[in-house]
Image (cartoon, grey):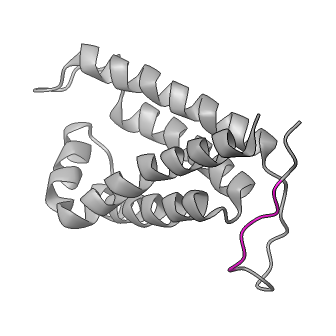
């Protein structure tokens, strides 16, 4: 893959998480209500954790910091979101099972992109030394 394609994909994946994270800060009650519709326990604190995770992780991907760790963290995040919020196999009043199945499958595509990104990104030790620097890049193969 060319570095330009990887950079573009990484930034788009980062935006995919950053923008909804900002939207959670802008309208927290709507997001908590959605979670409560799906019977998510501890909806409010989990919504705030998701908001911070989305913004911080999205920025990490866009800025190229701890890309492998962030991408793998978002893989776990998507699995949890799919199981808790896009549970098309359950009936929830006012929720379309067809739409939830579409979101579930769409998220699997995003998850696949994250796995490719994590597989390409070099590992980086967790350290405070140079934490602000971008990850080293691999030469295109």
Q: Would residue 122 be found to the left or right of residue 97 on screen?
A: right
Q: Would residue 34 be found to the left or right of residue 43 on screen?
A: left
**138 vs 28: above or below:** above
Residue 55, horizontal then vertical, whole percent:
43, 64
Residue 140, horizontal then vertical, whole percent:
84, 41
The structure residue drawn at horizontal position 79% and vertical position 42%, both measured from the top left corner, is: 120
Residue 42, horizontal then vertical, whole percent:
33, 57
**115 vs 139: above or below:** above
Residue 105, horizontal then vertical, whole percent:
45, 20
Q: Residue furthest bottom?
A: 129
Magenta segment includes 69: no
The structure residue drawn at horizontal position 52% and vertical position 64%, both measured from the top left corner, is: 59
Q: Nearer the viewer, residue 90 or 105?
A: 105
**112 vs 129: above or below:** above
The answer to whether one can see residue 88 in this image is no
The structure residue drawn at horizontal position 43% and vertical position 46%, both measured from the top left corner, is: 16
Main secondary-structure element of the magenta-colored stretch: loop
Q: Would residue 111 be found to the left or right of residue 86 on screen?
A: right
Give the magenta range.
132-137
The answer to whether one can see residue 20 in this image is yes
Figure disc tally: 0
The quadrant of the image that shows the C terminus is top right
The structure residue drawn at horizontal position 26% and vertical position 58%, both measured from the top left corner, is: 23
Image quadrant assignment for residue 117: top right
Image quadrant assignment for residue 132: bottom right
The quadrant of the image that shows the N terminus is top right
């Amino acid at each position: 893959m060319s570095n330009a394609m990887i950079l573009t994909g990484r930034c788009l994946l980062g935006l995919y998480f950053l923008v909804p994270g900002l939207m959670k800060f802008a309208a927290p009650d709507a997001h908590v209500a959605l979670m409560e519709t799906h019977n998510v326990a501890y909806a409010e604190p989990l919504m705030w954790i998701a908001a911070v995770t989305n913004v911080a992780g999205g920025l990490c991907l866009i800025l190229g910091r701890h890309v492998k760790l962030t991408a793998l963290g978002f893989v776990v995040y998507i699995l949890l979101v799919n199981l808790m919020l896009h549970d098309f196999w359950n009936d929830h009043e006012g929720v379309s099972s067809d739409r939830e199945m579409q979101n579930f499958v769409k998220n699997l595509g995003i998850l696949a992109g994250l796995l490719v990104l994590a597989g390409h990104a070099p590992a980086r030790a967790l350290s405070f030394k140079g934490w602000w620097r971008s990850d080293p890049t691999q030469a295109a193969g």
